[in-house]
């Protein structure tokens, strides 16, 4: 269990990135949702020992992640949003080098671990190719391979599918799903579908504040019967609805505006019940949030 209490961070200039975040995160896949600038990367960097909070604590099975940085790094796997590689090194050589840095000094053991990770991340056939020639999805899979070195107990991945094409995104999500059972895996993202497909628990943060936590299914159930949809042909009609109703989100469908609206009671005038999804939860929470 990862236990986080009252984490707060204010940057020079007065930007309050985190405002007293408290969470309990069990083993398994945990989704951290929020828009850009919500504080997700700051939160991840603190847990990864790259940044000190102003106040608060984070402990994993009794280990103080903030005070005991060296011990934390030995059990941590981290894939940051911007993951750099030596472009002229091959995947197998780079993993071997990183394994040594992780303290895996026995050559035979290291070889076995590196080869197993390349197989697991589906990079075996390109293991001798220079990393600079990898596609975005291949680099992300290599990032997971290095994060899994030395059997980490805590794995942090920050915006891992941003910029990936649909096929690479599916490969990457399948890989994450396969590893996220016996360790704490925190998936930080602004892509709602990543959390819906992978995570048994989640939290939403906005402007550095925790605004929702729990199970995705329960959050969706809480909105069932309260979301209504209408396709409108003109901007004038859209603007009128936005002034009258609690609009959750708007999508373009066939060149028209589809509005999704929150209402406790049934709506007439062309509104139909909508099947609630996690995106409705996300946008509803963000729309209601007013920073302290």
Image (cartoon, rainbow, N blue to C red):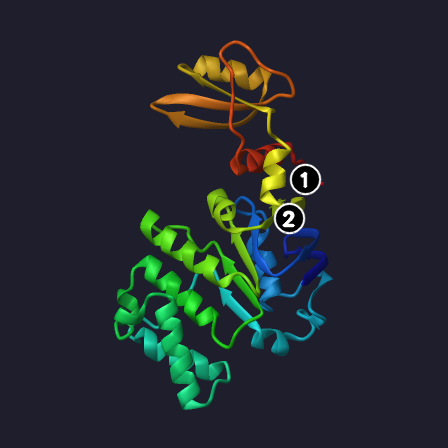
Residue of label 2: 208
Which of these two is toward me, 35 or 273? 273
Percent position of residue 185, x then y: 55, 60
Farthest residue toward the top?
Answer: 269
Residue located at (64% from left, 17% from top):
265
Q: Is residue 247 above or below residue 286?
A: above
Q: Residues within 10 Å of mark 2 (few under 14, many from 20)?
A: many
Front residue of 283 and 180: 180
Q: Residue at x 34, y 54 (%)?
A: 168
Q: Position of residue 154 (x, y in %)?
A: 58, 67
Question: At which x and y percent is residue 45?
Answer: 57, 62
Q: Quadrant of the C terminus?
A: top right
Q: Nearer the viewer, residue 152 or 87?
A: 152
Distance (Cα) linking label 2 and label 1? 8 Å
Q: Residues within 10 Å of mark 1 (few under 14, many from 20)?
A: few
Which structural element holds mark 1?
loop
Query: Which circle marks residue 130 in the picture?
Result: none
Residue positioned 39% across, 75% down in the render: 116
Instruction: Report the residue marked by disc 1.
Output: 291
Q: Is residue 19 visible?
A: yes
Mark 2 touching mark 1, by CB under 8 A? yes
* Quadrant, the N terminus: bottom right
Residue found 47% across the figure and 43% down from its top: 193
Describe the element under mark 2 as helix, strand or loop: loop
Q: Quadrant of residue 255?
A: top left
Q: Is residue 189 left or right of residue 136?
A: right
* First-in-chain label (2 vs 1): 2
């Amino acid at each position: 269990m990862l236990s986080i209490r009252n984490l707060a961070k204010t940057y020079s200039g007065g930007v309050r990135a985190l405002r007293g975040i408290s969470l309990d995160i069990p083993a398994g896949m945990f989704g951290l949702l929020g828009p850009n600038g919500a504080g997700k990367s700051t939160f991840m960097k603190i847990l990864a020992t790259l940044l000190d909070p102003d106040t608060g604590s984070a402990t994993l099975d009794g280990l103080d992640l903030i005070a005991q940085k060296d011990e934390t790094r030995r059990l941590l796997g981290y894939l940051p949003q911007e993951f750099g590689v030596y472009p002229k090194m091959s995947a197998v050589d780079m993993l071997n080098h990183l394994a040594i840095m992780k303290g895996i000094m026995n050559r035979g053991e290291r070889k076995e671990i590196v080869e197993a990770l390349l197989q697991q991340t589906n990079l075996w056939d390109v293991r001798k190719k220079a990393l600079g020639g990898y596609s975005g999805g291949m680099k992300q899979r290599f990032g997971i391979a290095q994060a899994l070195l030395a059997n980490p107990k805590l794995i942090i991945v920050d915006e891992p599918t941003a910029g990936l094409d649909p096929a690479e995104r599916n490969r990457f999500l399948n890989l994450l799903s396969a590893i996220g059972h016996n360790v704490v895996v925190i998936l930080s993202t602004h892509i709602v579908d990543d959390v819906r497909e992978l995570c048994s628990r989640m939290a939403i943060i906005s402007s550095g504040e925790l605004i929702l936590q729990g199970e995705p299914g329960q959050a969706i159930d809480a909105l069932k019967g309260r979301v209504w949809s209408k396709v409108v042909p003109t901007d004038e009609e859209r603007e009128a609805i936005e002034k009258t109703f609690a609009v959750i989100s708007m999508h373009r469908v066939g060149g028209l505006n589809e509005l999704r609206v929150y209402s406790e009671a049934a709506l007439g005038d062309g509104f139909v019940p909508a099947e609630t999804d996690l995106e409705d939860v996300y946008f509803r929470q963000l729309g209601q949030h007013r920073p302290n």
